Amino acid sequence: MASYALGIDIGGTFTDIVLYDRRNAVHHTRKVLTTPDDPARGSSPA
């Protein structure tokens, strides 16, 4: 079984990212701006 699970929700304003470490029961979250014309611009945190 993989030790990580990844969830991504791309919305109209923000993209939400959740990484879950199953082995250590720890999750990390990130919210970035959704920029459909250039996804690389959305890499800075909101």
Image: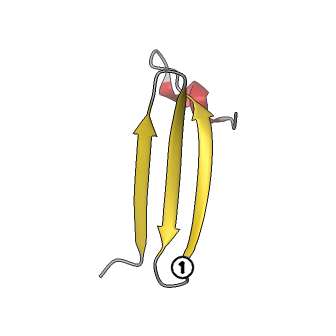
* Secondary structure under the numbered disc 1 in the rendered image: loop
> Between 34 and 38, which is closer to the camera in this rendering?
34
Residue at (61%, 47%) from the top-left corner?
30
Give the color scheme: rainbow, by chain, secondary structure or one colour. Answer: secondary structure
Residue at (51%, 35%) from the top-left corner?
15
Give the quarter of the figure containing the N terminus: bottom left
Residue lying furthest top = 37
Q: In which quarter of the image is residue 3?
A: bottom left
Direction from residue 28 to residue 39 in the image, left or right: left
Residue at (41%, 53%) from the top-left corner?
7
Give the quarter of the figure containing the C terminus: top right
Expressed as whole percent of the image width and height from the top left, the position of residue 10 reads: 43, 33
**Figure disc tally:** 1
Residue 1 versus residue 7 in the image, above or below: below
Expressed as whole percent of the image width and height from the top left, the position of residue 37 reads: 46, 15
Direction from residue 17 to residue 46 in the image, left or right: right
Direction from residue 6 to residue 15 in the image, left or right: right
Are there few (<14), some (14-19), or many (20+) residues within 10 Å of tag 1? few
- The residue identified by callout 1 is 25
Amino acid, disc 1:
Ala
Residue 22 versus residue 12 in the image, above or below: below
Residue lying furthest left = 1
Q: In which quarter of the image is residue 27?
A: bottom right
Residue at (51%, 48%) from the top-left corner?
17
Expressed as whole percent of the image width and height from the top left, the position of residue 42 reads: 58, 29
Direction from residue 19 to residue 31 in the image, left or right: right
> Between 11 and 33, which is closer to the camera in this rendering?
11
Residue 44 versus residue 19 in the image, above or below: above
Residue 28 versus residue 21 in the image, above or below: above
Expressed as whole percent of the image width and height from the top left, the position of residue 24 reads: 55, 83
